[in-house]
């Protein structure tokens, strides 16, 4: 059912637009100002490896506290209820485990890497580096395929822009503008700009979201008890118990714990915070100090979504829009719920600050992702095939060209691909393609002397099985849930590493073709 | 079911409190680290010597 356009009008005012424009221009200026500190590849790609603990932690949380995070967390919580809070809790546990033990990340930082795939060349051979680079960049770019659409949806609904005309056209126009903005910004800046703007974004968003949450829960029609009553009425036990039959279940949650742990040390944009730290101990402490942030970044948007659920249910017009078949029969338009709720509930000024912060977060997540994949493409995919490697200037040039091409891909993908029911599951599956194999090869490479090149090949290629998770598998095989597939893929990759390493142990190190040619 | 509701309530409350403490630590020290980062990068450029050598590309 379509709602009348005036329903989409929000509290977003001229003052809020002023705040947004000023904030974005200021961040752009900061990005350009810090550009003068970029003098080498390591400055551009890992911020000169000179970032202190507090700044690195702010950047670690800032990279992960994006507009996309806010959107997918709110979509999941609106659909699943309080049970979704189990995912933020797992995020906290994973960061705490890595931060407490320094598992993998300290070793990676010790090796002064610029990208994670470089490790694979050091431990195995250059072909594994290229393979991991291809898998990491392709799964990473696919993973961020929904980011612009979600960002544009948030901006269009929270500001009330959709009241001006056809919602889809407006979302697409906003998305195009956002992509152009972020591509230009990333090409200019580099990692130093990412780290510094991450800090400002972390401060503005953290304070803004918490004040916003206070406003949401101070509203006379919203209270904790009312949210609990509404949610349990709509979803029963599954609204609060993540192990209930209609909720996530044990297998999905165990898979999530492994996804979070492995992404902390092998997912480029997150793991790069270990590489930007000024030393291995700071790398470890970054994850420990950042652990509460890993909870808050998804729990607070989830609380907004839960409040939105209770708020919209009480209004007959909105109830018809969001729950056309009844409150207990599942929701429609879930991606629009949280932005609309914020736009209608938060006061002028605070709304502008929050939207500006989230828009900056959108840019910050994109530039961090763009930069990581571009670094991998130039250093780990192109460079190994060039005789004598490529110069620092060429690496930066290739990285910038890659960023422009990624922007083009995102535009096409965003216009063509519809948002799936669970954005988070889409992201987890696309990430799984790389994470499953890379995690096995990384952990095996660091902690098991017998891990061989053949084992690493088998594990990396085994991760490709996750691609089938993008298709509606459960319609064909009812017991094969996303959780079972995701978890089984991790086990399979670990087994492949062990079996192939034992069957085909390494004999002598392989060398690059150009080195072989020069030896002849 | 009521145990779960209580659990989420306390988890959110404690989580927000701990995060507020983290904010109080990170905001001032992070600002200091920004100046230290610029200083380190400037010193490195002036000296024309990397603080730490990169891996081979």
Image (cartoon, rainbow, N blue to C red):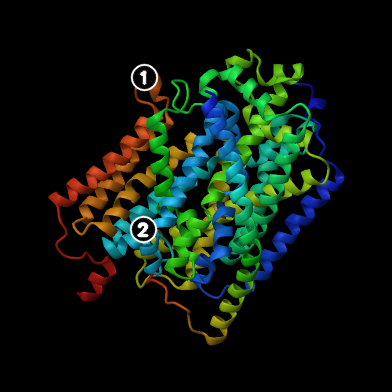
* Placement of A140 over or under A429, stated as above or below: below
Q: Chain of mark 2?
A: A
Question: Which labelled disc corresponds to residue A478?
Answer: 1
* Placement of A396 over or under A246, stated as above or below: below
Callout 1 touching callout 2 (CB < 8 Å): no
Residue shown at 55% from the left, 59% from the top: A57
Q: Chain of mark 1?
A: A
- Which of the pair A383/A32 is nearer the observer? A32
The answer, for residue A137, to whether it is visible in the render is: no
Residue A293 pos. (x, y %): 56, 50
* Placement of A281 over or under B20, stated as above or below: below
Residue shown at 86% from the left, 47% from the top: A15
Q: Quadrant of the C terminus of chain A?
A: bottom left
Q: Are marks 1 and 2 on the same chain?
A: yes
**A227 sits left or right of A519 in the view:** right
**A396 sits left or right of A443 in the view:** right
Label 2, residues with CA under 10 Å away: few <14, some 14-19, many ≥20: many
Question: Which labelled disc corresponds to residue A104?
Answer: 2
CA–CA distance between discs 1 and 2?
Answer: 36 Å
Single out the residue that lies furthest toward the right: A14
SS label for mark 1: loop
Residue A467 pos. (x, y %): 38, 36
């Amino acid at each position: 059912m379509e709602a009348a356009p005036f329903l989409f009008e929000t509290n977003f005012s001229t003052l809020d637009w002023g705040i947004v424009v000023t904030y974005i221009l200021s961040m752009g200026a900061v990005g350009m100002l810090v550009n003068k500190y970029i003098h080498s590849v390591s400055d551009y790609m890992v911020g000169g490896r000179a970032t202190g603990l507090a700044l690195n932690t702010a950047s670690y949380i800032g990279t992960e506290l994006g507009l996309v995070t806010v959107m997918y967390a709110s979509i999941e919580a609106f659909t699943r209820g309080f049970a979704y809070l189990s995912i933020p809790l797992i995020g906290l546990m994973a960061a705490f485990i890595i931060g407490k033990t320094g598992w993998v990340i300290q070793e990676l930082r010790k090796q002064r890497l610029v990208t994670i795939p470089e490790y694979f060349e050091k431990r195995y051979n250059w072909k594994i580096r290229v393979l991991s680079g291809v898998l990491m960049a392709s799964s990473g770019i696919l993973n961020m395929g929904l980011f612009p659409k979600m960002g544009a949806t948030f901006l269009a609904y929270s500001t009330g822009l959709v009241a001006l005309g056809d919602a889809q056209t407006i979302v697409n126009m906003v998305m195009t503008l956002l992509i152009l903005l972020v591509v230009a910004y990333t090409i200019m800046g580099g990692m130093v700009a990412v780290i510094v703007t991450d800090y400002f974004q972390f401060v503005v968003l953290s304070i803004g979201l918490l004040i916003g949450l206070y406003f949401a829960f101070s509203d006379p029609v919203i209270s904790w008890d009312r949210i609990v009553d509404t949610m349990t009425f709509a979803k029963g036990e599954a609204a609060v118990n993540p192990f209930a039959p209609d909720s996530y279940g044990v297998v999905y949650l165990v898979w999530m714990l492994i996804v979070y742990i492995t992404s902390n040390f092998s997912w480029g944009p997150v793991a790069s915070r270990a590489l930007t730290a000024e030393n291995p101990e700071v790398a470890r402490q970054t994850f420990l100090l950042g652990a509460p942030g890993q909870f808050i970044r998804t729990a607070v948007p989830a609380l907004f979504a839960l409040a939105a659920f209770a708020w919209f249910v009480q209004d007959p017009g909105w109830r018809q829009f969001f729950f056309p078949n009844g409150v207990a029969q599942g929701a429609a338009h879930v991606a629009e719920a949280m932005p609309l709720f914020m736009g209608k509930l938060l006061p002028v000024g605070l709304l502008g600050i929050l939207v500006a912060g989230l828009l900056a977060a959108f840019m910050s997540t994109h530039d961090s992702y763009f930069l990581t994949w571009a670094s991998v493409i130039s250093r780990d995919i192109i460079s190994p095939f060039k005789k004598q490697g490529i110069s620092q200037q060429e690496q930066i040039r290739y990285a910038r060209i890659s960023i422009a091409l990624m922007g083009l891909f995102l535009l096409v993908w965003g216009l063509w691909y519809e948002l799936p029911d669970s954005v988070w599951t889409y992201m987890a599956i696309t990430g799984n393609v790389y994470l499953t194999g890379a995690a096995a090869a990384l952990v095996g490479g660091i902690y098991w002397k017998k891990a061989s090149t053949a084992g690493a090949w088998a594990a990396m290629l085994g991760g490709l099985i996750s691609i089938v998770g993008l298709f509606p598998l459960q319609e064909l095989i009812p017991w094969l849930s996303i959780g079972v597939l995701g978890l089984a893929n991790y086990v399979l990759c670990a087994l492949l590493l062990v079996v192939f390493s034992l069957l085909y142990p390494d004999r002598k190190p392989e060398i690059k073709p150009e080195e072989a040619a020069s030896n002849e | 079911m009521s145990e779960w509701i209580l659990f989420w309530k306390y988890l959110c409350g404690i989580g927000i409190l701990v995060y507020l403490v983290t904010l109080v630590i990170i905001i001032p020290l992070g600002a200091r680290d920004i100046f230290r980062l610029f200083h380190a990068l400037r010193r490195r450029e002036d000296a024309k010597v990397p603080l730490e050598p990169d891996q081979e590309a």
